[in-house]
């Protein structure tokens, strides 16, 4: 039996994983990660009907009107990524206190693309999506990322994220 960490979880980071705190996400970006994880869970465990929780979470975080749009656009991004990738998207449980603190390689790539898009660096966001989508057609994922980011207010100059700086965004 694996030992549990301080959060009661036995999940060990895999090669390429990092702590969510290393991603330098804003509160809005962390919310998108949570919503995306809930959608991924719903897609892999359809009986859970977790998609309803994704919309509820988005509504709680962003308000009733904007939350529904954020959730819809996040779902569009999730679907575009799934269609473009050949291999499964590895995601962490949105409800496990230990797992939710770890970002898989794919989660890191998705969130880096979102952060870069919000900063207006479309070229690097596109490159990140190419890697995430395993060089598949990224047009739909790029458009979905752009649409989601247009809804989220752009980060303010000098805005302090909820975590320390991540080397990819420097």
Image (cartoon, helix red, strand yellow):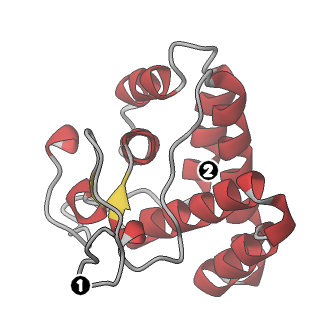
Nearer to the camera, 82 or 119: 82
- The numbered mark at residue 148 is 2
Residue at x-position 29% and y-position 47%? 17
- Name above or below for residue 165 compared with residue 100: above
**For residue 165, which quarter of the picture?**
bottom left
Q: Give the alpha-carbon distance from disc 1 to disc 2, as whole Å.
A: 35 Å
- Name above or below for residue 141 compared with residue 60: above
Q: Secondary structure at mark 1?
A: loop
| Left or right, 143 with reference to 169 | right
Residue at x-position 21% and y-position 58%? 22
Residue at x-position 40% and y-position 67%? 99
**For residue 105, which quarter of the picture?**
top left
Q: Is residue 143 visible?
A: no
- Name above or below for residue 18 compared with residue 97: above
Nearer to the camera, 14 or 72: 14
- The numbered mark at residue 6 is 1
């Amino acid at each position: 039996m694996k030992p549990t960490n301080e959060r009661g979880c036995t999940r060990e980071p895999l090669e390429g994983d990092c702590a969510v705190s290393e991603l330098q996400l804003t509160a809005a970006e962390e919310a998108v990660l949570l919503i995306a994880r809930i959608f991924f869970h719903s897609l892999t465990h359809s009986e859970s009907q977790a998609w309803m929780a994704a919309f509820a979470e988005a509504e709680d975080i962003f308000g009733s009107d904007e939350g529904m749009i954020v959730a819809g656009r996040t779902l569009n991004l999730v679907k575009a990524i799934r269609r473009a990738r050949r291999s499964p998207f590895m995601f962490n449980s949105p409800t496990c206190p230990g797992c939710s603190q770890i970002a898989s390689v794919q989660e890191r790539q998705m969130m880096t693309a979102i952060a870069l898009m919000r900063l207006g660096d479309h070229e690097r966001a596109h490159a990140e999506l190419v890697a995430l989508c395993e060089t598949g057609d990224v047009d739909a994922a790029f458009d979905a990322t752009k649409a989601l980011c247009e809804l989220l207010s752009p980060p303010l100059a000098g805005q302090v994220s909820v975590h320390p700086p991540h080397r990819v965004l420097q």
